[in-house]
Image (cartoon, helix red, strand yellow):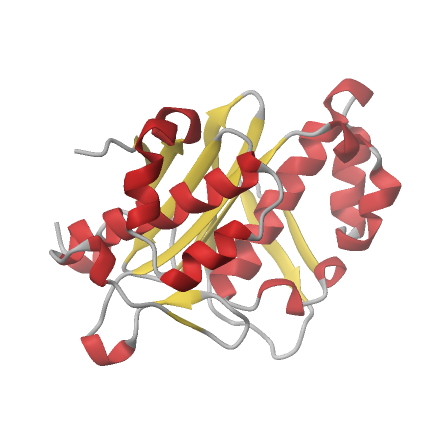
Amino acid sequence: MNASKRMPEIWRVDVAAEIRRLPVHRGQLTYIERSRAARFRRDADRERFVIGRSTRRELLAGRLGIDPAALVFEEGRHGKPRLPPDGGPGPYFNSSHSGQWVLHAVADIEVGIDVEEIRPEFAELDDFAWVLSDAERAFVLAAAPPQRAAALATVWVRKEAYVKALGEGLSRSLPDIGITAGADGRPMLAFDRNPPARERRWSFVDLPIDAAHKACVVHAGPARRVIVHDYRPD
């Protein structure tokens, strides 16, 4: 397959399955990463962070043929991690974690990914009105009350994955971004009124994780086939 057409790699990491390897994961982190992990108050949050950082290192190191602990990261203007450009053109990547899962996206194009556990508070629409465009609010309100939390989580992960793909995070006004269903039913960027204008095409793919989570990956350019792989340490 031509490298320019390589499919984005999506990796799903089961946090519970990786707890037994927690010492290995912790040992692959830098002092700064371990210090950041120690600041989490809840064990579950700390474990997700450690496993997420370590498995990201393993996946990228495997692709580059180096030791996971040898990887060096830097951050963009808005905090998105990347590999230093002086090492040559490396892969684009992004990660997210929530609930039971850590998700990683690795690609040869700009990419963003987000996963959210569907929590009861997502049904409180007024608490999240600040992130929604009018069309997105209508989408959530159209859902039956028992499905409203899942509908809002769907909107959230699409929008979060998009701004992460841009590398600008929440520095952009979220109500000025509209992501709706296209003629084929798939999510698409309807508008982004934030300056500067973004002319590049973006493709959205809702990811099937499980009934308790919603996830989306966004990548630059025309749609490509996306497959979710289950992470295995070997």
Q: Position of residue 176 (x, y in %)?
A: 73, 63
- Please indicate, yes or no, whether residue 85 appears anywhere in the rendered image: yes
Instruction: Compare residues 27 and 227 and report the one nearer the observer.
Output: 27
> Which quadrant would residue 68 be assigned to in this image?
bottom left
Residue 140 in which image quadrant: top right
Q: In the rendered view of the protein, which quadrant contains the C terminus?
A: top left
> Residue 205: in sight, yes or no?
no
Marker count (numbered): 0
Residue lying farthest to the right in this orientation: 126
Judging depth in this view, the residue of 35 and 179 nearest the camera is: 35
On screen, residue 156 versus residue 107, left or right, reads right
Where is 43 relative to 8, above or below? above
Q: Where is residue 79 in the image (x, y as percent from the top left)?
A: 51, 69
Side (left or right) of 141 relative to 188: right
Residue drawn at (58%, 55%), measured in percent from left and top? 189
Q: Which residue is drawn at 28% across and 40% down?
A: 24
In this rendering, the answer to whether 151 lies above or below 96 is: above
Towards the viewer: 202 or 41: 41
Residue 77 image position (x, y, % from top left): 51, 77
Q: Position of residue 37 (x, y in %)?
A: 49, 51
Q: Residue at x 66, y 36 (%)?
A: 153
Identify the residue shown where x is 41% and y is 54%: 94
Q: In which quarter of the image is residue 142?
A: top right
